[in-house]
Amino acid sequence: MTPVTAKGRPVVRALAGHALIATALIVAVLAVAPAVLSVTALLNVQSAIGLALFACATNLLIGYGGLVSFGQGAFYGIGAYVVALAWLHLHASFWISFACAPVVGAAAALAAGLLALRTRRLYFALLTVAVSQLLYVVVQQLQFAGGANGVFGAMLPGFLTSSDNAYWFTLAVTVVGLLALWQVTRSPFGLTLRAIRENRERAEALGVNVFRHQLLAFVISGAFCALAGALFVVYDQSANPDLLNWTESGYPIFMAVIGGQFTFLGPALGALVYEQARDVLLVNFTDSQLVFGGVLLVIMLAAPDGLVGLLGRGGRELVARR
Amino acid sequence: MSAEPLLDIRGLTKAFGGFTAVAEVDLAVWPGTIHAVIGPNGAGKTTLFRVITGTHRPTRGTVRFDGRDLTGAPPHVVSRRGLTQSFQITNVFPRLTVLESVQVAVLARHRRSWDFTSARGRRTAGEAAELLDEVGLAAAAGAQAQTLSHGDQRILEVTLALATRPRLLLLDEPTAGMSPAETGRMVALVTALAAARDLAVVLCEHDMDIVFGISHEVTVLHRGRVIAHGPPAAVQADPVVADVYLGGEQ
């Protein structure tokens, strides 16, 4: 949310126009990537695209709802397990189980949300960790879910065994998912959600049922996190307990912080940057986590609105100078 | 005057542990009137407001509004029945624009905050803009609420409450921290609204000039109890009131 003054409106509209063109350009470049990139590099970008959906779905809660959930990895993992387990035990069609993943994610989020949203702030964050860690531990004990090793195998249909097709499929699902999430954020529901983030008591006093709005946001986020988890199967042909771990829940939060949590596509940009930067860090530094921590700290201090905030600031100056 | 008060409070008591903040309070507010609740700091005014609006549950007693029992109803339900409050501290949505803020209230009233299809709903934007026109904030529609002056934030605060089309508006110290000019603007706004919209106003205010200038009825609280009630002139002349309250401060 860029600061808007009555006078500054045309600037914002111009910036929004630029953002739209920039987004269309990025999608176009990503769409032709298979023609240019090696199979390994393409797989890397494919992973980042899936994570972009994960990050934006998580940011519906963090950036728009002001609900810091450290448990979104649970829904991401559930999405992957739905596809993998349906293949392993039911020999179900991939397409059907893929479509079911967000539905199961939504149902799980409804149950978790009913519990966690009874609390606020830190307690909410801790409860989301608790729920996802519980799932993480339990899944490792379940023999039918492959225990600690998870489920892996040739679970993709013939069409997706082509690396180019798998890439385009991931890109298409992510673009459609992001468009749906974007519509949520700009709808009356999205506005009400932001109002709750800004001032819960005030929204309540105006007749808004805060709990139900937050619960629905939690369910929507859970559904799209699960969809991103199903895309992980397209990337990795596996589902494993680590997807449910709280460290996995941390990635979309990092991405949102890096990219900018108060803009819709900030977390997506954060995902693309993070995935590339992580490889560079891993190759060049023995203590890559330490360097990463330092970079994150600098971003949080110097650019609390993330990379998109920085770009926006630069863009505003450019537009204003004209 | 109608036969039944719009807001009818009987024997309302709120205790926190061993401390009784509000004790056996009766209060009747009639449609279209301005009713001031005054009392020294700690008299229980804010607690009384919070029980009425559902933020606190009463220990004993009943709250009836518009012929229906509202005792212990949660804030969003109280608001939907037509009883809305404006807050003592400036209480807006800092990073929403002024127009967006009012839209949130309009959407809540239309039960359209569940809408996923439209881009914020053009109709509600129109209604919100009209309201901003009425209160004189139209020029600031695109500004973030946190960038407004203190006085304008308080006006926005009241506008948010108005956007829910209340039949009764609770104003908790509407002029606190305002400059004399801002205070004048707020007082003019409140009296105009009460007259134009047949709106009942319950006002908690420290400025006695305002209280006795615009109220139709005054209730005086002291240590959680009602010690006087009546038209402003009668309350002003009441020796008990002068002793515990007005004499102490003025």
Image (spheres, coloured by chain):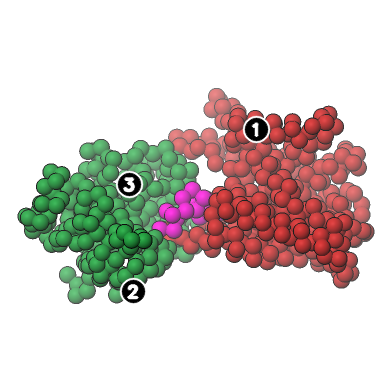
Chain colours: A red, B green
Magenta stretch contains residue A263: no
Q: Amino acid at mark 1?
A: Leu
Q: Both on one chain, marks 2 and 3?
A: yes
Q: Chain of mark 3?
A: B
Whether residue A182 is visible, yes or no, is no
Nearest the viewer among A243 and B244 is: B244
Q: Nearer the viewer, mark 1 or mark 2?
A: 1
Callout 2: helix, strand or loop? strand
- Crowd tier of the residue under label 2, counting other residues whose Cα lies within 10 Å: few below 14, some 14–19, many 20 or above: few
Q: Chain of mark 1?
A: A
- Say which residue label 3 marks: B155
Nearest the viewer among A261 and B88 is: B88
* Image quarter hosting the N terminus of chain B: bottom left
- Say which residue label 2 marks: B69
Q: Are marks 1 and 2 in contact (CB under 8 Å)?
A: no
- Crowd tier of the residue under label 3, counting other residues whose Cα lies within 10 Å: few below 14, some 14–19, many 20 or above: many
Q: Both on one chain, marks 1 and 2?
A: no
